[in-house]
Amino acid sequence: MEAASDPSKHELQLLGLSSAAGALGALDATPLPSEAAPAEPIAAAEETEVGAEPATSRRRQARNIPVEVMILVLTALLLALTLKTYVADAYEIKGSSMLPTFHDGEKVVVLKSFYEVQRGDVIIFSSTEDPSKDLIKRVIGIPGDRVEIEGDRVWVNGTLLEESYVYEGRSSAWSDPKKICVDVGPNEYFVMGDNRGDSYDSRRFKTGPGVPAENLKGKVIVRWWPLEGLQAY
């Protein structure tokens, strides 16, 4: 199986105040004459005019637009490539071994870095038998655990698991073994599909039950398709 203005700068400019201040300074502490002298007019404030932008400037800006768009596109592509390579990736589910949790054709996002694998997590890993094939399963046992299976019941370190995610239907594709007892090795994981009767997993791997940590591709964190089934894990 395979799984986002610059505020405008405002300037305030006071013009012609020096001439006004000079006129007002002449009145300071000066006795009034018998006949009032005509007041000198205060220089009028200059008006700021807004003119049309030159055509050459507009053409220069128009030529810059494609360059800016190209830079944005390249930046977005670089970011997407970095995320896909180091952080997360998308997978499409193929098959039925993870029913009812995941169905054939659904798509999930897998976290490839900054995660810790715990019991109950759904992971994607490369097959120990065919490294070109990616599988999706649920983690049942982590390093150091003892996993015991008898029929439909699973114990981990002596505790019976309550598995509400297990598919209630049955499939004849695989017959469940009578009893399994496995001590999970260092840096290994014991995994099973939720559709226990139709899952090729740690119970049947020919290379041994443990999935090496180096084979892990990541942990499923979101089902994003179909949209009505959007769910985080």
Image (spheres, rainbow, N blue to C red):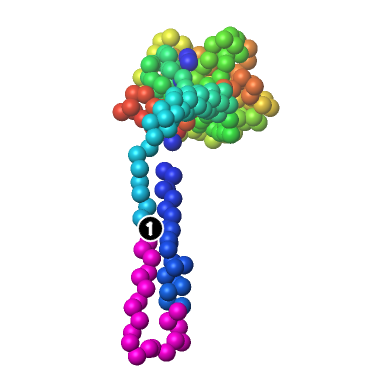
Q: Nearer the viewer, residue 38 or 17?
A: 38
Q: Can you name the residue that lies furthest to the right here?
A: 186
Residue at image location 45% in from the left, 83% down from the top: 28
Q: Nearer the viewer, residue 119 or 122?
A: 122
Q: Amino acid at mark 1?
A: Glu
Q: Nearer the viewer, residue 136 or 21?
A: 21
Q: Quadrant of the C terminus?
A: top left
Image quadrant in which you'd find residue 208: top right
Q: Nearer the viewer, residue 128 or 216?
A: 216
Q: Residues within 10 Å of mark 1 (few under 14, many from 20)?
A: few
Residue at image location 57% in from the left, 16% down from the top: 126
Residue at image location 54% in from the left, 25% down from the top: 78
Relative image position of residue 60 (x, y in whole percent):
44, 29
Q: Is residue 177 visible?
A: no
Q: Which residue is mark 1?
A: 46
Relative image position of residue 221 (x, y in whole percent):
47, 31
Q: Can you name the residue that lies furthest to the left here?
A: 228
Label 1 sits on a secondary structure element that is: loop
Residue at image location 63% in from the left, 12% down from the top: 207
Q: Is residue 39 visible?
A: yes
Main structural element of the magenta stretch: helix, strand or loop?
loop
Query: Is residue 32 found inside the magenta-colored segment of the image?
Result: yes
Write the start and end of the magenta stretch as one range.
26-45
